[in-house]
Amino acid sequence: MTGSDTAALAAIAPSARIEHRRDGVWIIAPDLDVEAMAREMNRLGFRLSTMTGLAQADGETALIYHFVAAGRAVHFKTRTRGGALPSITPILRAGSWIEREVRDFFGVRFPGHPNLAPLLRPAELREGFFRDAAEVPEQLTRARTEPS
């Protein structure tokens, strides 16, 4: 990452904590403007690789947006507000299926998404079923074996 790239990333979320790790640059910004992030990452030539969700005890979901470009990686960690974050799909089409998957698994709402129809969730599971792993039917979980 060049110094100007890092400065551009810092400008997206001025109050964010920026960490340089072995797997790339991490920007921890609980109040991140995800639409501004998507526009700037697109301008810098990064592509959205995937997103990671993690249910939080307070009912919100931590989300990590993973971007890559030419061997570089940037990860933005933020959290939902009221169970929602604006959709980045109108800015980055790659967000479409990823946001649908996050909605299926964690129940996150993405206002502005053009089509939040279920993507992966079996009909017998409620939206956001990853929030409580105890609700996942046994036939949908991996078989566990006890160590001998």
Image (cartoon, rainbow, N blue to C red):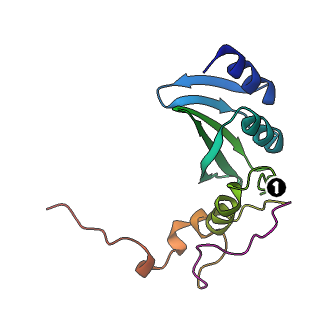
Among the 4 quarters of the image, the one containing residue 15? top right
Considering only vertical position in the picture, is 101 above or below 27?
below
Q: In the orientation shown, which residue stands out farthest toward the left?
A: 148
Among the 4 quarters of the image, the one containing residue 47? top right
**How far across and how far down the image is residue 122, in percent?**
57, 80
Q: Amino acid at mark 1?
A: Pro
**How far across and how far down the image is residue 140, in percent?**
44, 77
Quadrant in the picture for the N terminus: top right
Q: Is residue 98 magenta?
A: no
Considering only vertical position in the picture, is 48 above or below 135?
above
Q: Is residue 105 left or right of residue 33?
A: left
**Camera-nearest residue between 73 and 77:** 73
Q: Residue at x 68, y 35 (%)?
A: 45
Main structural element of the magenta stretch: helix, strand or loop? loop
- Is residue 13 among the parts visible in the rendering? no
Q: Residue at x 85, y 60 (%)?
A: 111
Residue under label 1, please give it.
90
**Camera-nearest residue between 138 and 113:** 113
SS class, disc 1: loop
Q: In the orientation shown, which residue stands out farthest toward the right?
A: 112
Quadrant in the picture for the C terminus: bottom left
**Camera-nearest residue between 127 and 74:** 74
Q: Residue at x 72, y 46 (%)?
A: 79
Give the magenta part as a residue range.
Answer: 112-123
Q: In the orientation shown, which residue stands out farthest toward the top?
A: 3
Among the 4 quarters of the image, the one containing residue 38? top right
Q: Is residue 95 left or right of residue 141?
A: right
Q: Is residue 121 magenta?
A: yes
**How far across and how far down the image is residue 138, in percent?**
42, 79
Considering only vertical position in the picture, is 46 above or below 52?
above
Q: Residue at x 82, y 53 (%)?
A: 86
**How far across and how far down the image is residue 14, in percent?**
80, 24
